[in-house]
Image (cartoon, rainbow, N blue to C red):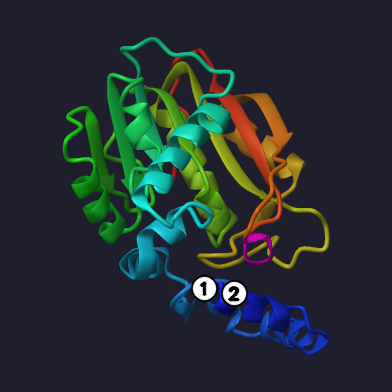
Amino acid sequence: MRVEKVLKAVLSTRVSTLALRILERTPVRSRLYSTSMHPTKGLLLGSGSMAEDWDQRAREGARFYVAPDYWASEEEFDLSGKQEVEAHILKGLSFPPDSRVLEIGCGLGRLLKPLARRFAEVHGVDISEEMITQCSERLRSLANVHVQQSDGSLATFPDGYFDFCFSWRVFQHIPEKRFVLRYLQEGSRVLKPGGTLRFDVAKDEGGSRRREGGGTWFGVVFTEDEVRRCLESCGLDTVEIRTEQREQRHARLGQRENWIVTGRRRGNGAPVGGS
């Protein structure tokens, strides 16, 4: 982790803080917020394109970029997926065994794998073709798991098909709020009336420079009021909005705190949302 420690030290200096503030006011802003760092391979400069940047991250070190705290081995990676399904994805929720679930931003299928034992149909989409290629290989033995590349919408799925739709550790990397809103609208559309949508977004703690735009690594941030308005506009009733409390090994290079949001599709059966 020597590279990470050096970068943290550099980022904490007054000179670097001033330089970053200046760069944020230039056209370099998007690329700045799209730059990530692998602990052994160093800085990975981003382009600002979600598909391009996540393809590159998948080739450089997919496990790390999916789960930065649990990437060292396949065993640790898979175990973290099981634990997060219990602690976050399905916490407080219950679904019959014939239910269908969709994950937006499935990456390598870290969460799809344990969910395959709980749902009749498990679907995942991701903007990265390379992630989908690797995910398909990792989960090829699971007949009820289906993954496909997304173009930023869920257009291949019919209205009211899923009982549960979720996204985890994905929206915090999206550079514009309109793209997050589009996924929420589409997620609501593909849910059955009464179906559940759960997701997390980066919390705007005040003073953030990523309220209106970020990059493909440091994405946009949301206030609680913005989250509530998003749910309302997508035809979702608010079930719960809570602040996530957790220790992050990569806190300085990632999001400090997230909102975890649960909504329920209104039960009138009418189509909701749009692109």
User: Chief secondary structure of the magenta span?
Assistant: helix
Q: Is residue 203 above or below residue 220?
A: above
Residue at 45% across, 60% down: 65
Question: Could you tell me which secondary element the residue under label 1 belongs to?
Answer: strand
Q: Which residue is mark 1?
A: 37
Q: Is residue 45 above or below residue 161?
A: below
Q: Nearer the viewer, residue 137 or 4?
A: 4
Mark 2: which amino acid? Glu
Residue 193 position, x and y percent, is 46, 16
> Is there any visible trace of residue 273 in the rendered image?
no
If the image is split into quadrants, where does the C terminus sit? top left
Q: Over which residues does the magenta segment extend? A: 250-254
Earlier sequence position, callout 2 versus callout 1: 2
Mark in front: 2 vs 1: 2
Residue at 51% across, 42% down: 168
Task: Check disc 1: other Cα within 10 Å, few if <14, some if 14-19, many if 20+.
Answer: some
If the image is split into quadrants, where does the N terminus sit? bottom right
Q: Quadrant of residue 5?
A: bottom right
Q: Quadrant of residue 190?
A: top left
Q: Nearer the viewer, residue 165 or 110?
A: 110
Label pair 2/1, CB-CB below 8 angstroms = yes
Mark 1: which amino acid? Met
Residue 164 part of the magenta-drawn span:
no
Residue 243 position, x and y percent, is 73, 38
Q: Which residue is mark 2?
A: 4
Instruction: Tell me the tag on residue 21.
Output: none
Is 211 on the left-hand or right-hand side of 88? right
Q: Is residue 144 above or below residue 175?
A: above
Is 15 on the left-hand or right-hand side of 7? right
Residue at 58% across, 72% down: 33
